[in-house]
Image (cartoon, rainbow, N blue to C red):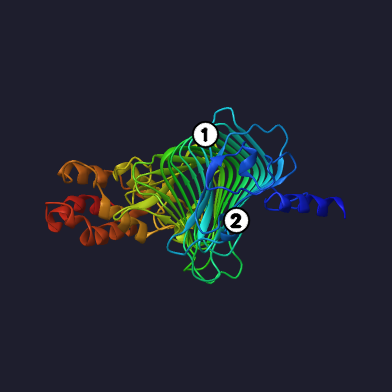
C-alpha cells in the first residue's frame, strides 16, 4: 500500500473524510476565520503557493447555503490562486454567495491570481475594508452566468491586471462590478470586456464613489459602464469602446477629482459630464465617429495638446452634445490648449455673450471658404464663414444681456460693419435682420432698417 492510500485508510478508520495528499485547500464551513485550520478540508491554513478555494456546493455543505470568510492572515509570499465561487447554489431566485471579507488593518493578502467566479445560482465576492491586498491578476465573471463583485471600502489594493467579463450564455442573474467607496487602488490595466458568444445582456460596471483609483490603462468595453461620483481617479489612458447601436458604452463623471492623460472613444459610446461636474482636463482627446458622443451639460473639457481642426470635425459629426438652445464652441486658451464648452451659437470669443466683439470676428472673415473655426465665426463646423453663421449670430445677438437690444446697440452694430464688405455684406445683413433680429427686439423691422439706411447710402 502506498503512502497516499495508507493516509486515506487511516482517515476512514477514524471516521474522517479522506482528502488526497496534495489536494487544494477548500473552505468547509459557512462562517469563520481564514486562519483556523479546521475550517479547511486539509486541516491546515492555505500556505504560499497553494490554490485556495472558497466554493459553496451541496456535496460539501450537506445542503445549500452561503459562505462568509473573515480574512485575517498575513502572507509574506503569495498564494498561487484564490477562487471564490458558488458552483451549486439553492436556486436562481435564492442566489447564494461565497464572500471573503478583509477588515483587519494588519492583514495582508498576496495572491498571483484572484478569481471571483459566478454561476446562475450565486456569486463570488471579495470585500476589502482594511489591510492590504496585492494581486498579480484578477478575473471577475469567468463563468457563464451569475455575479462577481469586488468591493473596496478601505485599505490598499494593487493589481497588475483586473478583467471584468460581462454577458451571459443563457439566462441568469447578478452583475459583474468593481465598486470602490474608500481606500486606495493602484492597477496597471483595468478592463471590462464582453464575453464572446453572449446570448443574454450582461453589463460589467466600474463604480467609483469614494477613495482613490490610480490606473495606467482603463478600458471600458461594449455595453459596459464606468461611473465616477465623488472619487479621485488618476488615469493614464481611458479607452471607451462601444459596439453597435444596441451595445452602447456609458461613462459618467458626476463629481470628483478626475485626471485623465488620454481619452479615446470609438463605436457607440457616451461620455456624460453631469450638471455641475466642472472641467475635465486631458492631454489628448480622440473621438472616432459620430456614434461617439460627449454630453457636456454645463461643463467644459480642456485638451492640452488640442487640435482645432480635430475639434471642428467632432462638431461636424455631431459628437459634441450641448444642452437645448446651445452649441458647443471651442477656443485656444493657452499655448497648445483648446477649451471645449457649450455656449450660445455666435459667441465667438467664449464669454457666454453674443455681442459686437463676436460680430466683428464674423465680419472680418465673412465669405471665407475653408480653414475657419469657431473663434473666426464658423458656428456650424463646416470650415466656412457665411450667411449660415451670420444667421446663427443674429438669432442670438445680445441674448445674454439683461434687457433687449437698445437703439444704441443697433447704432454700434452699424458702425462696426467693415468697409471692405460693402453693399453685399449689407444686403446679407438686412436679409438676416428681417428673418431674425426683429424677433428679439421691441422695435419694428422698419425702424431698424431706417437706422441702417444712412450706412447703406454711404457705401
Residue occupied by mark 2: 60
Residue lying at the far top in this picture: please name it. Answer: 106
Quick one: 278 or 359, which is closer to the camera? 278
Q: Is residue 350 left or right of residue 405?
A: right
In front: label 1 or label 2: 2
Q: How many marks?
A: 2
**Viewer can see residue 147:** no
Quick one: 188 or 287, which is closer to the camera? 188
| Label 1 SS | loop
Quick one: 449 or 172, which is closer to the camera? 172
Q: Residue 103, which numbered label?
A: 1
Residue lying at the far right in this picture: please name it. Answer: 1
Q: CA distance from mark 1 to mark 2?
A: 26 Å
Residue under the image location 69 percent in, 40 percent down: 44
Query: Which percent across, then down, holds residue 412?
Result: 24, 42
Q: Decide: is 12 above or below 120.
A: above
Q: Is residue 113 left or right of residue 167?
A: right
Q: Are marks 1 and 2 in contact (CB under 8 Å)?
A: no
Quick one: 66 or 97, which is closer to the camera? 66
Q: Residue 377, which numbered label?
A: none
Image quadrant in which the N terminus is located: bottom right
Which of disc 2 and disc 1 is earlier in sequence? 2
Amino acid at each position: 500500500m502506498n503512502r497516499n492510500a495508507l493516509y486515506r485508510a487511516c482517515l476512514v478508520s477514524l471516521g474522517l473524510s479522506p482528502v488526497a495528499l496534495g489536494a487544494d485547500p477548500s473552505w468547509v464551513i459557512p462562517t469563520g476565520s481564514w486562519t483556523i485550520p479546521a475550517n479547511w478540508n486539509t486541516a491546515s491554513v492555505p500556505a504560499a503557493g497553494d490554490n485556495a478555494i472558497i466554493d459553496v456546493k451541496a456535496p460539501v455543505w450537506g445542503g445549500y447555503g452561503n459562505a462568509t470568510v473573515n480574512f485575517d492572515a498575513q502572507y509574506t509570499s503569495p498564494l498561487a490562486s484564490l477562487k471564490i465561487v458558488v458552483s451549486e447554489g439553492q436556486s436562481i431566485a435564492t442566489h447564494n454567495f461565497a464572500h471573503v471579507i478583509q477588515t483587519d488593518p494588519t492583514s495582508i493578502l498576496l495572491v498571483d491570481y484572484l478569481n471571483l467566479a459566478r454561476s446562475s445560482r450565486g456569486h463570488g465576492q471579495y470585500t476589502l475594508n482594511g489591510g492590504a491586498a496585492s494581486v498579480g491578476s484578477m478575473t471577475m465573471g469567468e463563468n457563464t452566468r451569475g455575479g462577481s463583485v469586488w468591493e473596496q471600502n478601505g485599505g490598499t489594493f494593487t493589481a497588475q491586471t483586473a478583467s471584468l467579463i460581462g454577458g451571459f450564455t443563457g439566462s441568469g442573474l447578478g452583475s459583474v462590478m468593481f465598486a470602490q467607496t474608500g481606500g486606495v487602488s493602484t492597477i496597471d490595466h483595468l478592463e471590462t470586456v464582453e464575453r464572446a458568444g453572449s446570448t443574454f445582456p450582461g453589463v460589467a460596471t466600474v463604480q467609483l464613489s469614494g477613495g482613490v483609483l490610480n490606473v495606467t490603462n482603463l478600458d471600458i468595453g461594449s455595453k459596459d459602464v464606468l461611473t465616477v461620483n465623488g472619487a479621485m481617479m488618476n488615469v493614464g489612458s481611458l479607452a471607451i469602446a462601444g459596439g453597435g447601436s444596441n451595445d452602447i458604452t456609458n461613462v459618467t463623471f458626476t463629481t470628483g477629482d478626475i485626471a485623465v492623460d488620454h481619452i479615446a472613444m470609438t463605436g457607440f459610446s457616451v461620455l456624460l459630464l453631469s450638471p455641475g461636474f466642472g472641467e475635465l482636463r486631458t492631454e489628448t482627446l480622440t473621438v472616432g465617429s459620430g456614434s461617439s458622443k460627449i454630453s457636456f451639460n454645463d461643463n467644459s473639457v480642456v485638451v492640452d495638446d488640442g487640435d482645432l481642426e480635430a475639434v471642428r470635425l467632432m462638431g461636424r459629426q455631431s459628437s459634441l452634445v450641448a444642452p437645448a438652445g446651445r452649441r458647443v464652441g471651442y477656443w485656444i486658451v493657452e499655448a497648445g490648449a483648446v477649451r471645449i464648452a457649450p455656449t450660445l451659437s455666435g459667441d465667438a470669443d467664449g464669454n457666454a455673450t453674443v455681442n459686437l466683439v463676436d460680430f466683428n470676428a464674423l465680419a472680418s472673415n465673412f465669405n471665407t471658404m475653408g480653414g475657419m473655426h469657431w473663434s473666426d465665426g464658423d458656428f456650424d463646423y463646416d470650415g466656412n464663414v457665411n450667411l449660415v453663421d451670420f444667421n446663427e449670430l443674429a438669432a442670438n445677438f445680445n441674448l445674454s444681456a439683461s434687457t433687449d437690444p437698445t437703439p444704441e446697440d443697433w447704432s454700434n452694430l452699424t458702425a462696426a460693419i467693415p468697409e471692405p464688405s460693402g453693399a453685399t455684406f449689407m444686403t446679407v445683413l438686412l436679409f438676416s435682420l428681417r428673418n431674425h433680429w426683429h424677433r428679439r427686439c421691441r422695435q419694428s423691422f422698419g425702424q431698424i432698417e431706417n437706422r441702417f439706411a444712412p450706412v447703406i447710402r454711404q457705401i
